[in-house]
Amino acid sequence: MKKNTGILSSTRGDGGLPAIGQSLVGYMARTRAYLSDTYPIPAGLVRAAIIFLGQSTVLANIHDTRVNLVSKYSLIGIWSVFSLLLILRLMDELKDREIDRQLFSDRPLPSGRVRESDLVFSLVVLIVLFVLVNSQAGNAFWAALAVLGYALLMFVYFFMPGLLRQHLLLNLATHNPIIPLMLLYLAILFSVESGMEIHHIDWAKTLLSIAMIWAPFFAWEIARKIRSAEEENAYVTYSQIFGQSGAVLVAGLAQALALGLGIYFYRIDLMSAAFTTILIGAFSIVVVGYVRFLWHPSPRTSRLQPFAEFFALATLVAVILDYVIAGSILTN
């Protein structure tokens, strides 16, 4: 038998590349296809930038200061939001693998378009990069670790997988707080960049701003699991738990809370009339989508997730525009 003369000669595949090289190429190809299908990187970066800038600019309004929208800390914040949301996406893919095999065989993992080992490797790399980047974030590093720790607890279902998998509402109550925790991390990062001690933050208004931005994301979580009767199956949805009207009401109340907080900020002169007008217009469009679904529930009208995404985007963009316009007025 011919003796192996080295690692390359002993691990060559049919294509002439070392087996480890072929594995890496395969991983990259599958991961690129997976991300293109479920988490496009350009769109993810834009979404992360909008979330970061939305929270930062409302905090700048609250504390009557200006923030550098292009800085080391803004890059850290945008990367952290982007990577955290992708970490959560990968975790969900792994957590849902069994139910996906049973009910959604066309999804990437059960269909074989991506391997479990690909997702695990990507998850480890992202976690390491998240920690390394935030090691440059000053005191916000500890907030970043807290958010990451909470995400890891979510991944193991808070050590109660059987209980949380069987109760959607309990799962919602334990998993959805990751969003306000992420926004709280951004508030601490804002204080670091502004040279502000944490105890000097106006926490009352800051927490209200976090609630205003979180509420549309909570509504999105509800809206994406609302179905018409003919679409319902073994997959548990909020329309099964609350009924179609009840589920729509829960999502609508969360969005109404965001609108109410926006009006409050306008009333105390932190936001402009333009901001409030955008919010009212976006909320009106969402209501039209809800009424259409309740009037005639069907697979076509039950697609309420895009309406929820639109309202969340409108809220953040309105905050950013309000900040930019106010700054332009002040400098003229």
Image (spheres, rainbow, N blue to C red):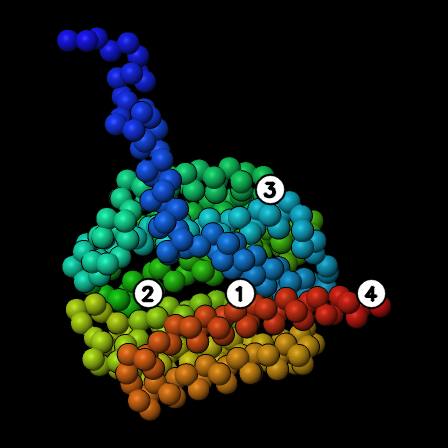
In this rendered view, identify the residue nearer to me: 219 or 184: 219
In which quadrant of the rendered view does residue 244 lie?
bottom left
Q: Which of the marked residues, 2 or 3, is nearer the chain's N terminus?
A: 3
Q: In the figure, is residue 271 to the left or right of 173?
A: right
Q: Which of the marked residues, 4 or 3, is nearer the chain's N terminus?
A: 3
Q: Which of the marked residues, 1 or 2, is nearer the chain's N terminus?
A: 2
Q: In the figure, is residue 239 to the left or right of 326?
A: left
- Residue 207, above or below 84: below
Q: Which residue is mark 2?
A: 172
- Residue 261, above or below 53: below
Whether pointer 3 and pointer 1 mark residues with C-beta atoms closer than 8 Å, the reply is no
Whether pointer 2 and pointer 3 mark residues with C-beta atoms closer than 8 Å, the reply is no
Say which amino acid is labelled 3: Gly
Residue pushed farthest right? 332
Residue in view at x 39 percent, y 46 percent: 32
Say which amino acid is labelled 2: Leu
Label 3 neighbourhood size at 10 Å, few (<14), some (14-19), many (20+)?
Answer: some
Task: Tell me, for residue 331, which label it has, or none.
Answer: 4
